[in-house]
Amino acid sequence: MIDVHCHLEYMEDPQKVIDEARQKMRAVITSVPNPKETQSMIDLVERNRNFLFLCAGFHPEHLHEYTREQVEDHMEFIKKNRKNIAAIGEVGVDYNWLKKEEERRKSEEVFAQFIDLAKETHKPLVIHTRSDNPKTRDAVDDALKILTNSNAKDVIMHCFSGSEENLKYALEQNYWISYATIIVRSDKHKRLAGNTPIESMLLETDAPWLDPDSKDLVNRPWKIERSAEVIAGIKDTTKEDVLKQTEENAISSFRLMI
């Protein structure tokens, strides 16, 4: 099994987590959306080659921390280190952290830059979307429009929680749909997964967040097995078949060499 999205930099002992994951999993993909933490995660990837893989990007919530020039420097850093980076992300649209229209416009410009970076580096693109109130303005809607207008390819919708219409459109674009372990306790995500072909599905934890049983930051990569159990019940198949297919999907979507 492969967790396509977690955050090892927020875990107390990342190497210990990796060592335990090796006993249970085929691979782990960690996402580092803050530029200041990217080098340390690259070092971790180099120590755990062919098991640990890295997504490097820029989370919208960090917009206030960096100048335009620093963001561009980070993009250059990613280009120079592309051999240690499996995907660009997470990047995207966030209306939970960014409240002002000026901030949102600026973040969309940065998002478009990272879409171009994914094209230039020939890497898949991992998309973050979060709304404070989807009824007033929906981040998934806007992200899908930006992706379409940019002719983005090889797209992974991280921690997908859009509408049924969003899901239908994303699938029509051949985007990958990644479900986090919140599916264990979310009826909405169960419904969405029921409408997602398993051939288009990925599994993630977003660990240490979204633990299936607790609100504490105790989620770990191997807990995607819990998601697989839920999806197996929805799809009337076995947990093993879900894990096998989503593992194959992860290898294909991220072009993993394992």
Image (cartoon, helix red, strand yellow):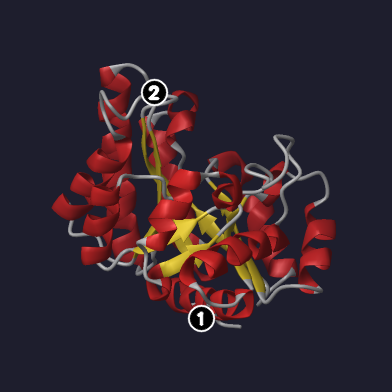
Q: Nearer the viewer, mark 2 or mark 1?
A: 1
Task: Classify 139 as above or below 13.
Answer: above
The residue closer to the viewer here, 123 or 138, is 138
For residue 19, the mark is none
Q: Secondary structure at mark 1?
A: helix
Left or right, residue 37 beside residue 87:
right
Q: Quadrant of the C terminus?
A: bottom right
Q: Amino acid at mark 2?
A: Leu
User: In the image, residue 21 lies at what x, y percent?
Assistant: 77, 66
Based on the displayed image, in which of its 4 quarters is residue 43 positioned? bottom right
Is residue 76 visible to us here? no
> Which of 211/6 is in front?
211
Q: Which residue is mark 1?
A: 248
Q: Residue furthest top?
A: 100
Relative side of 125 to 206, left or right: left
Quadrant of the rendered structure where residue 103 is? Answer: top left
Q: Quadrant of the N terminus?
A: bottom right
Badge 2: few (under 14), some or many (20 or more) residues near its Cα, within 10 Å? many
Residue topped by disc 2 = 98
- Residue at 80% across / 58% down in the picture? 17
Give the SS element for disc 2: loop
**Mark 2–mark 1 contact, CB under 8 Å?**
no
Of the pair 211 and 96, the residue shown nearer to us: 211
Q: CA distance from mark 2 to mark 1?
A: 36 Å
| Precedes in sequence: disc 2 or disc 1 | 2
Seen from the viewer's position, the closer of residues 42 and 215 is 215
* Residue drawn at 39 percent across, 54 percent down: 192
Q: Which residue, as the protein is rendered here, is positioned at the far left?
A: 149
Image side of residue 248 versus residue 227, left or right: left
Give amino acid for label 1: Glu
